[in-house]
Every structure is written in C-alpha cells, then in structure tokens.
Image: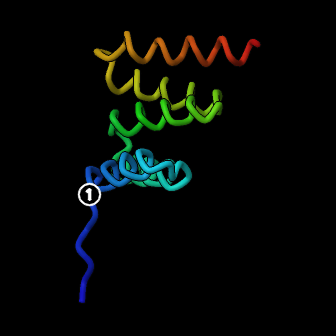
Amino acid sequence: MSETPVSRYDLYRSAKSHEANGRYDEALESYAQAIKASADYAHAWFYKSRLHFNLHQYKEARSCARKALELAPSWEKHIRTIIKSCDHQLKS
C-alpha cells in the first residue's frame, strides 16, 4: 500500500496546529519539513521565524525572517519588524 504524498500545505497546517496546541518542537519540525518540500514557501519561513522569536531563539528567527523577506518582499513591513526585534534582543 503506497502512502499519500504529503504536500507543503499539509505540513504547514500541521505546524500551525502543533503551534496552537503548544507543541513547539513538533511545529518547528513541521515547518522545516514544509520548507524541505518547497524551499520557496515564504509562509513557512515567516511563521517559523515568528515561532523561533516567541521561543527567544533570535538568531534562528532572524535567519528565517531574512529568507522570508527574500521570497516575499511585499511582506517587508511585517518581516522587518521581526528582524529589528531580533537585532534588539541580540544586542541586549
């Protein structure tokens, strides 16, 4: 019996569900799998960045946010806020 392929969208939805239920490690893993399935998936990069930020993982958050900005420059206002917040926390 063959398994049904899991799409980047399925992985993203799984990540959001894990995050909503406080399962942050599982959420990060699901975001990473969504990105692995589609490296240009800006939503996964953005929300992975936000989760890293909320977990006080500022270097990881900034890195993911920069990738999201590269992929979705029209989201610059929201992404720059994360990057600036990370920079502020890293300087503290």
Q: Looking at the picture, which amino acid does disc 1 mark?
A: Ser
Q: Looking at the image, is 54 positioned above or below residue 17?
A: above
Looking at the rendered image, the quarter that the C terminus falls into is top right
Q: Looking at the image, is 67 positioned above or below residue 29?
A: above
Q: Where is residue 42 shown, x and y percent of the image?
A: 34, 33
Q: Residue furthest right?
A: 92
Q: Residue at x 61, y 19 (%)?
A: 86
User: Toward the viewer: 36 or 55?
Assistant: 55
Left or right position of 43 against 32: left
Left or right position of 83 against 79: right
Q: Residue furthest front?
A: 21
Q: Where is residue 76 shown, x and y percent of the image?
A: 37, 13
The colouring scheme, among rainbow, by chain, secondary structure or one colour, is: rainbow
Q: Looking at the image, is 5 positioned above or below residue 35?
A: below
Looking at the rendered image, the quarter that the N terminus falls into is bottom left
- Residue at label 1? 7
Label 1: element kind: loop
Q: Where is residue 28 shown, x and y percent of the image?
A: 50, 48
Q: Quarter of the image holding residue 45?
A: top left
Q: Residue at x 46, y 12 (%)?
A: 80
